[in-house]
């Protein structure tokens, strides 16, 4: 017997037929004697419809009333899933955010969970009732409905799991797990069985869009075991439990699994790519103390996220080229800022390039393995791929390359770190 | 300064453009210094959509979960109207059923208001905030959402008006008031300025579908002045207040208005017609004590609503024909019941006729005027219209006639009681 939180996204509950499929998966978990709480999103497209209504009503909308409107989407699916489970002979009931309650700080439209009252929920689950909970919603101190910002249902589910001391939190999405890299690029990409919170955060932030970053951080904070699974099983049969998804766990659980021999230690767990960066080069910057600070301080103050930085050896004495990356979406703003400060900074030209990609190799194993970065540079050099910039963290090495070489680089590195599966496709 | 509850139905709030029109009408009331609470229905079509989802999910749905799903429609419009009012510079906020709270007896999907907490609402209105309230919804003792059955928003509005001691409750519909008769039949029908609760109930129950009967009964019980107005004013200009609708008031207020000379006493206030009745004739029923009771007792026990009853003089000695009416929808059931009891009742034949219409003249004035029924029979006889059955109450006389003569009868009576307007159309 385990206590499980299951979470289904908008695509999984889009329409009564899909809700029936979800109910089958939930029923299978309950039938195994597990205590089950289900967190649901609004039907795909519904939140957009409601947000549009709000925009039409009032472009500068009051977030408190916005929350009244948009929270209704999850309310509908929670009632419908409870009804569907009942039709299958299960005991089930919905619990709205204000009923539990899910208390949040009253930051309307972008609330954060303060505290979830788990007692009544646990009592109901112990009495054999499946709890169905609308994700994304809570209640403020003044008893008004709050919502947690787009995609907040993953976070709701993790917070719920923490509140009721769940053995794990299963997130059903349209992918069936986290892969060593994008399977559309590398056919031999493998599904990762276990991954540490920290690795997942690095992979998520560099483009593996399986889970919301915030939900992974929260799981890490409360030590909630998170599992990613697919809800798109063929014919809707309740075999989801047997599909091995990806389990996201703590570093200490990883260490224990390694000790037991349940998993092998690898230096690199996964490879991510991100084509949304842009490169900026400032040429002939005066090579004097404080010059670099003068460049990056205003960018930081403007909220522009600078990632990689390289300072080239100057071609002329007393001058240097400074290269860095910013998100493409912020490139225009960064350029305007630099143009304004041209005289003060004393550089010659700004050269920008959006045709770049960031390739990252991520793994807890780097902490104990040496030579991970060297392997990367050699593998890329052997194929003639030029590295334009580098950044590293304790568990990640990222390089900036020409965008056209993205797929090649990912494939080369996937092989170099021994990640290729023996058979194609997972 | 007055305290007013305004209620808008589903057609009036179908889409953000119509909600803007409603907001204009509401703003005009508030701008006159009135304290305003607005009760809204779900967008037209939305409740049907949600009910269908419930049926698809579970044909034998749990009414508690049904309420979670369908109450969301009014939640959405209340938030959107608050947003729209804010966009126009008004202070406004929504109050959901559980927030006020609107306490109901936990008869899910068909709840009745037990008690509405008006204090916070009054405080908010006194502080200049327009209160926007989703109709149709409340909360049970166990803190679950309840709904009041289809069309319950009129009743919500009246209950709200009673709870906050409103000076009047304005119901905006797609007709702009109650008319002396159906204007599609009589072009000279006049809008009624004042009508007593009792008259309105008689007119509503015989086919003038302007207000829900339950809301009128509740208004009568709590002495809430009800006004019917149209929300379909041209170009959405905030001139609604100047449109004279129909005011539904107590008998004592009517008496006062008569004394003041604000209105004239008339014997008949309005004329209604109803084509949904069917006539049943049992021929050659034994003319003995208890025979009639033997016919009507089983019909009553089966919940079949028998309206008019006539016992003809028997053609043969010791026999009589019994004629009565039932709603057309219940005719088949009534006939089956009578067939089953043919031997016990000892009648000869059952003759049924759905091609009949009930014409009713209604007016508090009948209490003091004499000859009202005589005027009716004479007017109909002069035009050769045959009366098949008659029923009367203190303020109503109804006759059953051939359905084909409905329009003629209504026109004749409208003239006979001096109800025709001087100019065509109101």
Image (cartoon, coloured by chain):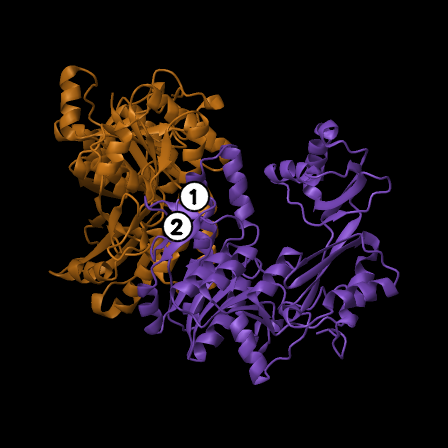
Chain colours: A orange, B purple
Q: Callout 1: 10 Å neighbours few (<14), some, many (20+)?
A: some
Q: x, y percentage for residue B155?
A: 49, 57
**Residue B173 located left or right of residue B420:** left
* Quadrant of the rendering where the N terminus of chain B is positioned: bottom left
Q: x, y percentage for residue A387?
A: 28, 40
Q: Do the dots labelled 2 and 1 sit on one chain?
A: yes
Using the rendered view, name the quadrant where residue B420 is placed: bottom right
* Image: A124 above or below B48: above
Q: Nearer the viewer, residue A102 or A269?
A: A102
Q: x, y percentage for residue A366?
A: 16, 30
* Image: A349 above or below A209: below
Q: Nearer the viewer, residue B204 or A354?
A: B204
Q: Callout 2: 10 Å neighbours few (<14), some, many (20+)?
A: many
Residue marked by disc 2: B104
Residue marked by disc 1: B107
* Quadrant of the rendering where the C terminus of chain B is positioned: bottom right
**Residue A161 located left or right of residue A275:** left
Q: Residue at x 73, y 73 (%)?
A: B419
Q: Are marks 2 and 1 in contact (CB under 8 Å)?
A: yes
- Whether residue A58 can be seen here: no
Q: How many dots with numbers?
A: 2
Q: x, y percentage for residue A75?
A: 40, 44
Instruction: Give the alpha-carbon distance from disc 2 to disc 1, as whole Å.
Output: 8 Å
**Residue A253 located left or right of residue A42:** left
Q: Residue at x 82, y 66 (%)?
A: B379
Using the rendered view, name the quadrant where residue A225 is placed: top left
Q: Nearer the viewer, residue A214 or B325?
A: B325
> Dot 1 falls on which chain?
B
> Dot 2 falls on which chain?
B
State the residue lying farthest toward the bottom: B260
**Residue B320 located left or right of residue B395:** right
């Amino acid at each position: 017997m385990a206590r499980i939180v299951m979470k289904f996204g908008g695509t999984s509950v889009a329409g009564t037929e899909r809700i029936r499929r979800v109910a089958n998966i939930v029923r299978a978990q309950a039938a195994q004697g597990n205590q089950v709480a289900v967190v649901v999103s609004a039907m795909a497209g519904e939140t957009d419809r409601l947000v549009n209504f709000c925009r039409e009503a009032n472009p500068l909308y009051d977030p408190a009333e916005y929350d009244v409107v948009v929270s209704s989407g999850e309310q509908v699916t929670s009632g419908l899933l409870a009804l569907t489970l009942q039709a299958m002979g299960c005991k089930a009931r919905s619990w709205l955010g204000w009923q539990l309650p899910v208390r949040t700080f009253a930051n309307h439209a972008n609330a954060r969970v303060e505290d979830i009252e788990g007692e009544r929920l646990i009592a109901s689950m112990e009495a054999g009732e499946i709890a169905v909970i609308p994700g994304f919603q809570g209640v403020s101190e003044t008893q008004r409905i709050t919502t947690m910002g787009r995609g907040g249902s993953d976070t709701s589910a993790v917070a719920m799991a923490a509140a009721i001391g769940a053995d794990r939190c299963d997130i059903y999405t349209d992918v069936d797990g986290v892969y060593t890299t994008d399977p559309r690029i590398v056919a031999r990409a493998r599904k990762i069985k276990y991954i540490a919170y920290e690795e997942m955060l690095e992979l998520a932030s560099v483009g593996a869009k399986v889970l919301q970053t915030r939900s992974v951080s929260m799981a890490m904070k409360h030590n909630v075991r998170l599992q990613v699974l697919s809800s798109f099983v063929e014919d809707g049969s309740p075999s989801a439990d047997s599909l091995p998804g990806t389990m996201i766990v703590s570093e200490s659980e990883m260490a224990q699994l390694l000790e037991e021999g349940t998993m092998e230690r690898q230096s690199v767990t996964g490879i991510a790519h991100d084509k949304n960066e842009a490169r900026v080069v400032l040429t002939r910057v005066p090579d004097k103390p404080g010059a670099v600070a003068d460049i990056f301080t205003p960018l930081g103050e403007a909220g522009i996220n600078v990632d990689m930085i390289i300072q080239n050896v100057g071609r002329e004495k007393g001058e240097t080229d400074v290269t860095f990356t910013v998100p493409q979406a912020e490139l225009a703003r960064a350029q305007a800022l630099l143009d304004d400060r041209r005289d003060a900074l004393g550089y010659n030209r700004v050269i920008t390039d959006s045709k770049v990609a960031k390739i990252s190799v991520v793994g807890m194993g780097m902490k104990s393995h040496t030579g991970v970065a060297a392997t990367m540079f050699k593998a890329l050099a052997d194929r003639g791929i030029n590295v334009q910039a580098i950044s590293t963290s304790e568990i990640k090495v990222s390089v900036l390359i020409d965008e056209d070489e993205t797929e090649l680089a990912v494939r080369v590195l996937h092989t170099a770190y021994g990640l290729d599966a023996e058979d194609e496709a997972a």
